Image (cartoon, rainbow, N blue to C red):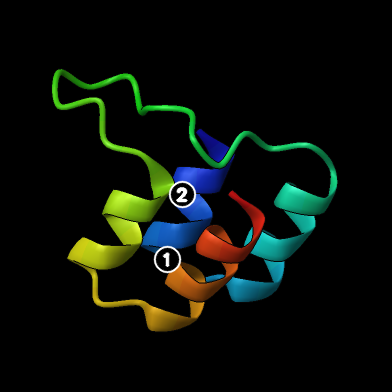
Amino acid sequence: SPLQFAVRKEYHELVEALIKHGADVNAPAGGPEGETALHTALRHEDLQSVEVLLEKG
């Protein structure tokens, strides 16, 4: 998803904009693991995205 991509690339402003415009922070990715954007942020140790996702999710 666009949100997953933004989190993976650490595009923090885009993460916030996508959420502001209705991106589902709890939507699982299409892969077999069903990883959410929060899982991705944690795996990449992106604490800024983790904070935003927890706050909005």
Residue for point 42% across, 65% down:
9
Around disc 1, counting alpha carbons within 10 Å, would you say few (fewer than 14), some (14 to 19), or many (20 or more)? Answer: some
What residue is rendered at 61% in x and 64% in y?
Answer: 55
Badge 2: few (under 14), some or many (20 or more) residues near its Cα, within 10 Å?
Answer: some
Question: Which residue bears the numbered disc 1?
Answer: 9
Which quadrant of the view contains residue 25? top right
Work out whether residue 19 or residue 1 is closer to the camera in this orientation and state it. Answer: 19
- Return the x and y of residue 40 as percentages of the image width and height: 29, 54
Q: CA distance from mark 2 to mark 1?
A: 6 Å
Disc 2 to disc 1: CB gap under 8 Å: yes
**Which residue in the structure is indicated by mark 2?**
5
Q: Secondary structure at mark 1?
A: loop
Front in this rendered view, residue 53 or 33: 53
Question: In the drawing, what numbered circle is on residue 44?
Answer: none
Q: Give x and y (percent) for residue 37.
A: 41, 47
Identify the residue at horizontal 59%, vertical 68% (top origin). Answer: 52
Amino acid under label 1? Answer: Lys
Q: Residue 29: give x, y in percent of width and height.
A: 35, 28
